[in-house]
Amino acid sequence: MRIATYNVEWFSALFDDAGRLHDDGGWSARYNVTRAQQTAALGLVFQALDADAVMVIEAPDQSRKRSTIAALTGFAADFGLRARAAIIGFSNDTQQEIALMYDPDVLQVRHDPRGDVSGPKGAQGAPRFDGVLRIDLDVDADEDLVVFSKPPLELMIETMSGFQFRMIGAHLKSKAPHGARNEAEALTINIANRRKQLAQAIWLRGRIDEHLAEATPLVVLGDLNDGVGLDSFENLFGRSSVEIVMGHGQAQPLFDPHARQALSRKLGAMPTSARFWIRQEKRFLQALLDYIMVTDGIRAKSAGWRIWHPLDDPECWNTPALRDALVMASDHFPVTLDLDDTL
């Protein structure tokens, strides 16, 4: 069985309100890329992945006028994908949903959120992800209220062989310092936003600990948007979202070989899953942002990970059409996990 996570930059902009692909010469939300070019590139990438399940980060918008599921199932039909069914959990107002595309002939999937309903006053611990977490962010003895801008997607999955496991798709992201009038204000806002992101990571780890206590096979995947050496806040806070969610240094950590490699070294080459153009510096920044973390029970199923990086993965590099499509389709590259899904 193959499980993938893929952050598709502004996937929503490729569809009209009826969920149909524009697939024309108009500009996509990606710089200097038309909608037809990005659509064709994404179709080729999804076909090459041929995954049983793809956690789509920044999936098309779910709102009163738009349907994430209609857009994704239509996309799957247009390109003949096995992962032709789709499911979402709690929608958000960012036009960047978290959704799973999957092969209904291979997997049974249902949205299965855990945690208590918190209400607007919030709750401590790990309430339901569409609620509010009460937590002291700045050690001032006053609790803050934290919400997910993109509530993680919690799923219960069963394979045709009867193997059951849980999956959580997540997109943790620290907001840009909007409204800052100078560098000092930008720094203050950045620190506050990063505290909120780390609180979300703690919240997510709380749910992971619950599943570990029940010995539930678990896959946590998506875009955590920070990590070792990525920005100047690492030394200030001591831990990244990746370390918190993994449980790095704890008795029961999750496992992701790329995250472990990054955490084990400060210098030297490390894996990357995203490539961004830094306009001011006129260069590309590469970073490891996308992960598939698993419990020991999943890892024991002959698990094998792969980042489909067009420049670093030999098979992608040596397949020009796929290599070019990966660059055209998104600023992130897919990560896959292959495993034996038998009992």
Image (tube, grey):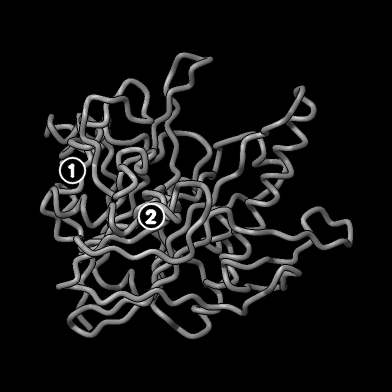
317 over 333 or under it: above or below: above
Residue 224 location in percent, x, y? 50, 50
Where in the figure is residue 184, as x and y percent of width and height? 79, 27
Residue wearing tag 2: 257
Q: Which mark is residue 43?
A: 1
Identified by mark 2, the residue type is Pro
Q: Amino acid at mark 1?
A: Gly
Disc 1 secondary structure class: helix
Dot 2 falls on a residue whose secondary structure is helix
Q: Which disc, if any, is residue 92?
A: none
Please identify the quarter of the rendering in which residue 271 is found.
top left
Q: Quadrant of residue 322?
A: top left
Q: Earlier in the sequence, mark 1 or mark 2?
A: 1
User: Is 41 placed left or right of 80 in the picture?
Assistant: right
Q: Give the residue displayed 33% in from the left and 69% down from the top.
A: 299
Circle 2 packing at 10 Å, graded few (<14), some (14-19), many (20+), is: some
Q: What residue do we see at 72% from left, 31% from top?
A: 179
Most foreground residue, 316 or 164: 164
Left or right, residue 149 beside residue 119: left
How far apart marks 1 and 2 lie (CA) works out to: 28 Å
Q: Position of residue 30 (x, y in %)?
A: 36, 29
- Relative to 197, say whether 90 is above or below: below
